[in-house]
Image (cartoon, coloured by chain):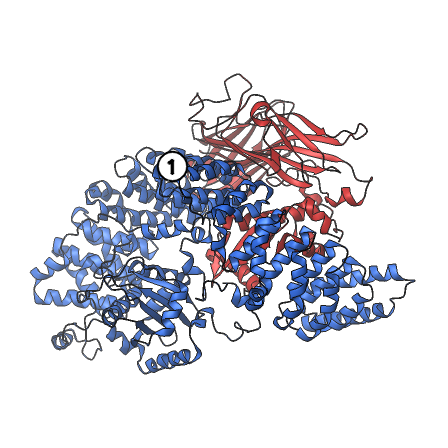
Amino acid sequence: MRDYLGNVPKASSEIFFRKVNFWDKGGRDAPPVFNVDGVSYLYVKDGGVFLVATTRENVSPSLVLELLKRIGGIIKDYCGLLSEEAVRKNFVLLYELLDEVIDYGYPQNSSSEALKEFVLNEPTMLKPSKSKGDALFSGVGKGPTGVIKSILDTSRTEGKAREEIFVDIVEKISCTFSSSGHVQTSQIDGAIQVKSYLTGNPAIAIALNDSLVIGRRETSGSVNYGGYGRGGDTVMLDDCNFHQSVSLDRFETERTLQLVPPDGEFAVMNYRSTYPFKPPFRVSTTVDEDPNSALKAIITIRITPDFGGDKAASGLEVVVPMPREVARVHCELGRDAKSGAAGQTWDWQERARRLVWKFKRVQGGLEHTLRVRATLSDGWGPSIKKSIGPINLQFTIPMYCASRLQVRYLQILKEHKSHQPYRWVRYVTLSNSYVVRT
Amino acid sequence: MGESKSRGELAEIRTTLASLASTSGSSKGETAVTAKREVFKKIINYITIGIDMSSLFMQVMTCAVSSGEDVVLKKMLYLYICTYAQSNPDLTLLTINLLTKDCKDQDPTIRGLALRSLCQLRVANLIEYIMSPIQLGLQDAHPYVRRTAVMGVLKVYHLDKAAVLNAGMLETLQEMMVQDKDAQVVANCMSVLKQAGAAQRLVSRSLVIPLLNRIKEFSEWAQCQVLEAVSGYRPSNEQEVFDIMNVLDDRLLHSNSAVVMATVKLFLHLTLSMPPTHQQVLERIKDPLQTLISRDHFETAYAVLAHFLLIAQRAPVLFSQIYTTFFCRQNEPSYIKSLKLEILTAIADETNAYEIATELTEYVNDIDEQLAREAVKAVGRIAIEVQDVGGIIERLLGFLETGKSYVTAEAVIQIKDLLRRYPTFAEACLASVSSIAPEDLVEPEGRAAFIWILGEYGHNIQDAPYLLEPVGTSFADEAVPVRLALLAAVGKLFFKRPPECQRLLGTVLSAAMADANQDVHDRALLYYRLLQQSVQEAERVVGAPLPAISHFAEEQSAELRDRIFDEFNSLAVVLRAPSATFIQETPVSPAEDVLAPGASAETPRAAAGVDEGSALLSSHEQEEALIDTSTSNGNSPGASLLSTSPPAAAPASPVSALDDLLGLSGNDFTTPAPAPSPPAPALSLDPRPLLTPASFQASWAALEPALRFTHPLPPSALAAIEANNHQDFCRKTGAAGIATMASGGVAPTFRFYMYAKPTGGSAMVLTEAIVDKTMGSASVTLKCADAAPVQPFAELFRRQLDAMAGVDQLGPALQSGWRLSPRSSMGPNVL
């Protein structure tokens, strides 16, 4: 959409689409970097929009991809969200932005904050599509904040817009259970996301757990078990990195991050932990021959939410791939006394050969069971048990934090007494890859 | 329909513009501006979706000028002008006044904006108007204007290099780079100087140290640039290396992967000659890199993973403990999963192979077929590389029973490779293999592998002849590799179990000798003649036991990897090829910029249909080259095929007698193709010749052609050359010591500029090869200051071209001393 150097073919956008859509006969995702006739294409996909860069030079792929990602972030900061519609409605604004962000192919000014000075067009805001449902944390897997708001709001409509800052601890957990129910591998990928709509850009301080330990497994004393099961309050992370704006002067001693948050959304800190944690869901499965019919198998799937009853997971989806031998299934939803089957559905997707068990809301501590009667085309055999699965879970648990990282306090370092911006500290845990092997 | 619609819209906008331009009265000023903004927005929307709005140039100008003070409108006007300046140079001249006036505006934002637009017009003959605003801009009090002006220098440089040099602008930038207070101005100066070929001025100690000390002032992108520039600097002693690394260590904690990767590159390159420190660096970067790949941003993680793979191949031990990091996650896109499988394969060793193979086994059940195949392949590779660990071969054999035909096929291929490497494993494998029915294997490659195993180990497989029989019956319907494999297998098995195989051999031989495929046909004929001559001799040749292969060629040689490592943190790592193979650099003098062809867009290069690479040729040479190609037109492809066979081929006469015997007289074959090639002429090439594009061009221009020839190519070779964007071909020739300077072109014509350095001599052999698909030939021109290597090189080059035909099947690969790749191991071992 913007050609800075004019050294790639005019048809490059068509070339790109053809390549991406028919990569490997259309079955797989095209890699984010590929080369056609000496022109390298680099893309980032976000919100259904491809952000593509082309070059004839041997550039750093990380640089280009990070820049594209940043541009996606800028569009979100200005238009509230990134979607085809948002781009279409805001061509002129985006040209303005792009011209400031990149000059002649070289990145210049990429801070949503600093760009405000140069941008004159008003964004055309879109109403968020209601279909996404979940009020607080829309769009599982993407950004944490359900807030759709342009950063221009604070500066342009003085007084009207709310002064507020969001600090979200977003953790994505990956967990693989062996067929015997043990955790094989697990990891937490977390981020402290900040979205700031404060005028005057005051400095803020985010204080984390005192007992935060950052370091590799080899160097920390205990080899096998870290935080979990140790009783104490210790939060163990393998490694982390920080946003440019963060000053670490008080981090070593007080575990406090100090920064002047630029407008817009960004990750103050990304972290990673491979220390064991308590998995929020346990799944057990049994597969048995139906005593009444040789052509049927009975599969029982039991989900145990292993977190406090004051919390609830939303949008839990349990996906069970079925082998070819399974011709039909019929399910009976939970007869568990307390919970009942309200808000649960099951769906047999015959073409994809998978059974999807959905929950609107799962309260902590309450078990749920699904009894599946599967009709087998070839009759019962012991191999059936092996070929079901692996079961895969998707969920969002608001106000839950797997690593137990906490924001002790969020301080806005501004002298005004009358100035009381809204401060939001939120926690959310999302499934990244939650796989139960059978 | 679309056109008429857009025409209607165009007319509508034209009317609106005209009416708005006339109502520029003061009373309605406010509303008029709003209306104008709306119509301008509309125009820009149309431009973006691809409707040509250039015919409105005059109206747009008049309309905007009458409300000159509105900045929003002004910005849109500039956007419009820059879009259509190139196609309307005359009208653009009219805008110059407006732009230069705005360059002196009170508001720095407007000054910068006007200057940026002015420099972006890309109209060469307007440069005289641009120079003085740039000069002023460079001295502007506001950093925004200075930044823009610095980039403006580069834009002009690409249009008119002399103008920039004469004005001494590079020197000005040099000074600004040291003195300017604004970090972005400094960064822009660096970019421009680097592009203008003055990069070496950036690497003095007095420059590097202050830059590093203030690195945090730079934006994250500019930090990358500084780090890149510093990686060209060679510190004077080890202490300095440590100092630099200490200053930059916290850059590894940056959340931007671009900064981290640039730092990693710098660290790795600084410590190349300090092995213990280098090792420490590798240890140090492990954690930050892992954090970068764990973020949920797949695209940036992909770039980092590609670098992980490169490092893992160089130092697998480093990662052997953290193998679980590379286990696939269910939500990852396939490109991440594939890379992870490769990394897992690379780092598998005695300590982790079992766990890795166990994890990979889970992926074999994945619904993504390609992933399942890659997982089988990875287990196969691990079984070959880490043979001491038990349980892995069992997993491989287990894949045969999954009931998925593609998994079985892939597993059979892996088992075949395993047996080639370790024939002693045969006993363990054969029971499982022999329980496969041929009809379970659909894909040719899997069938061929299965047949190979039956032929090789048929004496231990009770049913072998009966398993082969149905394949023999359907011979004509099989793919070429299967037919070849069957011929070889039946040939071998015949000597082991003659009574059971005689009839099958007869069926297969007669079918194969009637085969339209030359390789199949020729091999069948060879067997037939051998048998005719003497059964004992034939057994000695055909039935000889195979030597175990000690080492499979990897897809990438260590040398190639080293070259890619030199280009760490660049596309070369992700695309897995040195940049020379995918960057079509026009070999110009180093000071000239690579962006030049595009920027100097007044020559409609692309429109003329001439590719970048041909810029190498002066026009008359190009004509000659074309004539050269056309002379090969006289050779029919079929006839020319014969000339590919080596000159020392067997005489034709005894063959005709056999022909009669078989009732095949009148056939046009005269030479048995699989005859061994003559020994390679004594020409050895430097494996990694080095030549700059500039000196290539200079030598090419200076030398007379030493030899010209046209070499016919069969379709399979043409396809192989074209495949993978020429990279395979360039890689193959590269492995033989013939490096590629530039390659390119669009079908049906491809051009290759290559060079090689004979060891012992000093003169480079320069090669131009024009491959023409329609002609089915390559026109090759060789130039060399020394006459001696030309003929042997020509022979070598011909063999390289021929070899492309046999890449997947049978070919002279063995004779010309290539290492076997696992996949090409079927063919050559027959003889």
Q: Nearer the viewer, residue A131 or B301?
A: B301
Please indicate whether residue B284 sits to the left or right of residue A204 in the image.
left
The residue sitting at the top extreme is: A231
Who's the residue at 40% across and 50% down the image?
Answer: B566
Q: How far across and down, in percent of the image, does residue A67 sit? A: 58, 49
Number of callouts: 1
Residue B121 sits in quarter = bottom right
Q: Is residue A390 visible?
A: no
Which quadrant holds the C terminus of chain A? top left
**Pointer 1 residue:** B277
Q: How far across and down, in percent of the image, does residue B56 sit? A: 74, 72
The residue sitting at the right extreme is: B27
Q: Colour of chain A?
A: red
Q: How far across and down, in percent of the image, does residue B728 sit? A: 36, 60
Circle 1 SS class: helix
Q: How far across and down, in percent of the image, does residue A428 sit? A: 62, 32
Who's the residue at 57% across and 66% down the image?
Answer: B166
Please indicate whether residue A402 sits to the left or right of residue A122 in the image.
left
Who's the residue at 73% across and 45% down the image?
Answer: A150
Q: Colour of chain B?
A: blue
Amino acid type of the residue tagged 1 in the rendering: Thr
Which quadrant holds the N terminus of chain A? bottom right
- Is B49 located above or below residue B705 in the figure? above
Q: Nearer the viewer, residue A310 or B776?
A: B776
- Chain at numbered mark 1: B
Q: Is residue A242 visible?
A: yes
Q: Nearer the viewer, residue A113 or B245?
A: B245
- Is A417 located above or below residue A264 in the figure? above
Q: Residues within 10 Å of mark 1 (few under 14, many from 20)?
A: some
Please indicate whether residue A405 sits to the left or right of residue B509 in the image.
right
Please indicate whether residue B804 sits to the left or right of residue A95 in the image.
left
